[in-house]
Image (spheres, rainbow, N blue to C red):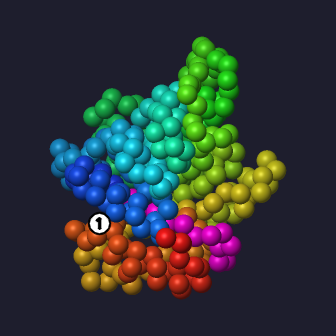
Amino acid sequence: MMTEQPLSFGIKTSQMGISYPEIQRIWREAEQIPVFEHAWLWDHMVPLRGDVRAAALEAWTLLAALAAQTSRLRLGVLVTSNRLRSPTLLAKMAATVDVIAGGRLILGIGAGGSAVPLEQNPAVREFAAYGVPLVPPGQAVRELGQSLDIIKRMWTEDEPFDFAGPAIQLTGAVCEPKPVQRPHPPVMIGGQGERLLRVVAEHADIWTYPGPPDATFRQRDQVLREHCAAIGRDPATITRSMQIIVRCGEPDAVPAARGQLLERIEAGVSHLVIAALLGGRPVQWLADEIVCPVLAAAGQPLPAS
């Protein structure tokens, strides 16, 4: 099923072994290229693989700096781990970034690490390093739903409120100033589990699926549609998102990336993120060699300059 929504393309800089000046260069270049509408960071305190001592800038601090240096790109973290920050702190941080950005934030969030074997969850080592407890997957998803309830209330309620939940108790919770966007910034949720997709149906404006557009994606998409039907929500109001990794120095990088993006578009995905290992190439190379040809193949016009 070809998506009926307008396509949007973004660029992602996963801060693993990459310097602040290089990330600045990429985002500043992307800001000047109309085919890129959004830009993303990655949320890990240490590299997921390789030398644990390699550079890994903290996502939300960096996002605030980049928000102050851009004016057009929508921006966010793909995706924030709900395990690493309390929902009240995250709501406050996100509201601050939206103010700095003049209303361009998308809150990307996921359940975060849970108690699964290391080979299935390479983020386990950062949790051990930062003293964050692992919890069963079901608990992680429940706490994600609770966090989103709290975050949205902090963004929209004018009066301080109390909250008594299984994982957090609040007295007089308040967030001022509010985000610029009303009623609040869009919410992107990442993941694919049955229980998590219920949270997507209840809270998400964008669903980012962590995989290719295969049979599993189609089955998960149907589950999301069933959850939407159960709560009376039109599933078409949730934008489908996926990302691809492009290793620009590989010989087949261009045809492979074009093919992957077109497969995702054919599957109904309209929000497309390119995590590019540029290898010194300019961001314009991505636009000229990959994004513009894909837009043409999909029969969609290039954005106006």
Find numbered disc 1 in the image and state the secondary structure of the residue it sits on.
strand
* Residue 4 horizontal side relative to residue 127, left or right: right
* Residue 25 horizontal side relative to residue 80, left or right: left
| Residue at (67, 77) in percent of width and height | 1
Residue 25 spot, x, y in % from top left: 28, 58
Quadrant in the picture for residue 80: top left
Where is mark 1, residue-wise?
Answer: 277
7 in magenta: yes
Relative to residue 92, is residue 303 depicted above or below?
below
Q: Nearer the viewer, residue 299 or 190?
A: 299
Relative to residue 289, is residue 67 depicted above or below?
above
Is residue 248 visible in the rendered image? The answer is yes
Q: Magenta residues?
A: 1-12
Graded by Cα atoms within 10 Å as few (under 14), some (14 to 19) or many (20 or more), the crowding at tag 1 reads some
| Residue at (46, 49) in percent of width and height | 76
Task: Tell me the amino acid under the disc marked 1.
Answer: Leu
Q: Nearer the viewer, residue 216 or 90?
A: 90
Relative to residue 88, is residue 186 depicted above or below?
below
Residue 237 spot, x, y in % from top left: 71, 57
Q: Nearer the viewer, residue 235 or 185?
A: 185
95 in magenta: no
| Residue at (44, 48) in percent of width and height | 77
Residue 101 spot, x, y in % from top left: 47, 44
| Residue at (82, 50) in percent of width and height | 232
